[in-house]
Amino acid sequence: MKFPATVLLLFSTALLTACAGTGPALPPTVSAGLETPTDTARAKSPTINVVTTNAVLADLIHQVGGSRVDVHNLVPAGSDVHTHQTTPVDSVRIAQARLIVTNGAGLAPQFDQLLDGSADADAVRIVASDGLVPSETTELIAPIEADGHDDADGRAAAESVGEHESSDAVKDEHGHDQRDPHFWQDPHFVVHYVNQIADGLIAADPQHTSEHLGNAASYVHQLEQLDDYIAARVETIPAERRVLITFHAAYGYFGARYGFEVLAFIGSHGGDVSPDDIVSVLELVQSRGLPAIFTEPQFSDDAVDQVARDGNIQVGTVRSLPDAEYPSYIDMMRANADSLADLLQ
């Protein structure tokens, strides 16, 4: 499926300008407030030191920056991004970074103070989700409603998400941010992330503008192909079985785009699984004849295993972040689609 023409126009227009010999041009989405590093030695470095706060962002930086970037990710692949704690080495890498990319929307607030205190004043800071409006997550075993479906193929109309991030975070009774920060579960929103990252790379490394824009445009095309692949796999699942039950509430945007009802044992920021939760899932699985529920490698799956044993159903695996087995975002998302299609038939 083609993503909106304005996204591709952003890349192609700026690329043509840069290649025409008029000097490196920044795309329209570059924020006026971004600061370009002025230190001569840093500007002439053969690579750009980049710090990211999750494995998706690290992969996207590699895709757009190519050989121009040296990336240090604060959360190793396979770790829980919500609770991971940094080391002294991380502080050093942050201080050396020319570009820092975070997700935003409350995904990993434990890094905010460290980044503010350790980052160089000239470092470019990018929040990948800025400009997107987050949905609320759920702490309960309850459906996350889809936004509707487009006319072409039944995928939810993710394009209806607004253009400005809400300034008021929704908190639960424990003070946890209830906004869903996992935008990357919808490839359409990853195009927005790529735009943001291209902005940051161009601000930090303007002499290679055309290279960054060319890489970004190429990757957007790969995201279009990924979107089509996931939709085709989902089409093989009977509509009444498009129910994604996971341990961790990270898949609301995936469900909204591809027409799944999404439920989870715990909310986005963790919590405990109660006996009532297990009973509720068992009742749902049995009443609707669901063949599988899903766990994630980085979380304890005792509750999921208990439901599987008691309900005599299969346990599949989905991933909210790349890991050693599926180290790229696209590989991870294709594997998730395959797992759902194979087990929910």
Image (cartoon, rainbow, N blue to C red):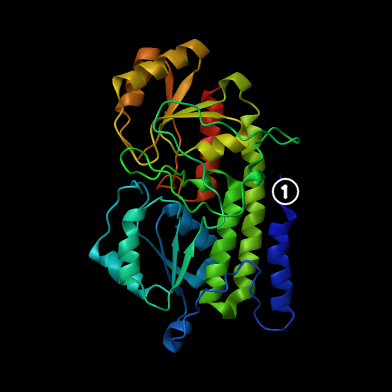
Q: Residues within 10 Å of mark 1 (few under 14, many from 20)?
A: few
From the viewer's perspective, is residue 71 above or below residue 38? above
Residue 238 seen in the figure:
no
Residue found at the far left of this picture: 88
**Percent coordinates x, y for residue 154 in the rendering:** 69, 32
Using residue 243 as the reference point, say whether residue 188 is left or right of it. Answer: right
Q: Which residue is at the front of the view, 323 or 52?
A: 52
User: Considering the image in quadrants, where does the N terminus appear?
Assistant: top right
Asked where in the image residue 247 lies, by quadrant, the reply is top left
User: Considering the image in quadrants, where does the C terminus appear?
Assistant: top right
- Give the amino acid type for the residue marked by disc 1 in the picture: Lys
**Percent coordinates x, y for residue 148 in the rendering:** 65, 33
From the viewer's perspective, is residue 167 above or below residue 299? below
Using residue 206 as the reference point, say whether residue 84 is left or right of it. Answer: left
Asked where in the image residue 138 lies, by quadrant, the reply is top left
Q: Residue at x 46, y 74 (%)?
A: 48
**Percent coordinates x, y for residue 54 in the rendering:** 41, 54
Count of picture labels: 1
From the viewer's perspective, is residue 239 above or below residue 84? above
Asked where in the image residue 248 lies, by quadrant, the reply is top left
**Percent coordinates x, y for residue 208 in the rendering:** 59, 77
Q: Residue at x 46, y 55 (%)?
A: 103
Residue found at the far bottom of this picture: 40
From the viewer's perspective, is residue 301 above or below residue 111? above
Q: Which residue is at the front of the view, 273 or 56?
A: 273
Residue 136 seen in the figure:
yes
Q: Residue at x 46, y 16 (%)?
A: 285
Provide the secondary structure element on which disc 1 rests.
Answer: loop
Q: Which residue is mark 1?
A: 2
